[in-house]
Amino acid sequence: MQRFRLRLRKFVRRFVRHEGAATVVEFALLALPFFALIFGILELGFIFLVSTTLENAITISGRRIRTGELQGSADSTAGAFKNSICANMTWLSSTCASNLNVDVRTYTSFNNITPPDPVVNGVLNTALPFTPGGPSDIVVVRAYYTWTIVTPLLNATLVNLGSNRSLISATVAFRNEPYTP
């Protein structure tokens, strides 16, 4: 027993004095949180990039409704408007058609704008209306892009659709110009 204690003390002293082991232990303790933080920051950056891209795309495409260009064209459908938005989301164009939903509604006054929540019980309502209105109508264009969250710690805070998916939305409201139909 005495011999075992002596060997144990010797081993502990050598381990404590050996700085390489301390570095390995410190790295192992700090690496996982560090990389989780880095991946979280990168993913949040992507989410903000998608959000900004979506806002710019609906602003540009919404102008087609505001000026009456869309209503006067041969293809004035929700699909054509959605394609117009996707054309302005160049770096997301490959997944845009399957992840984008568009809601276009007209209102009688700006005070009456109360659009309903498109997510009910964690499910996105994909049967959204498309009524671009006529001259001088008040129009609200809302676009919803489904984004898959990869970083585990962000799931708890950003997921609102289930299955690690989050809904990124952008809205623009305007009064149509008094164009000639």
Image (tube, rainbow, N blue to C red):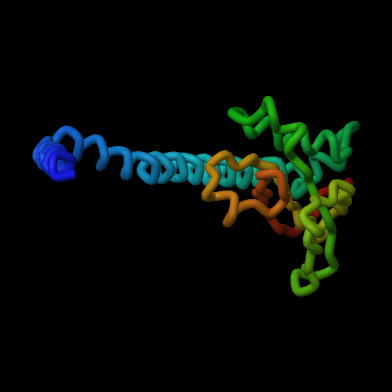
Residue 9 drawn at (x, y percent): 13, 44
161 sits left or right of 55 in the view: right
Give the residue drawn at x 79%, y 61%.
138
79 or 30, which lies in front? Answer: 30
Residue 160 drawn at (x, y percent): 68, 54
Give the residue drawn at x 78%, y 68%.
114
Give the residue drawn at x 50%, y 41%.
43
50 sits left or right of 75 in the view: left
Residue 155 drawn at (x, y percent): 59, 50
> Is 38 drawn above or below residue 107 in the view shown?
above
52 or 132, which lies in front? Answer: 52
Do we see residue 16 in this rendering? no
Give the residue drawn at x 13%, y 44%.
2
For this orientation, the residue located farthest to the front is: 1
10 or 87, which lies in front? Answer: 10
- Quadrant position of residue 23: top left
Q: What is the quadrant of the N terminus in the image?
A: top left
42 sits left or right of 119 in the view: left
> Is 16 drawn above or below residue 135 in the view shown?
above
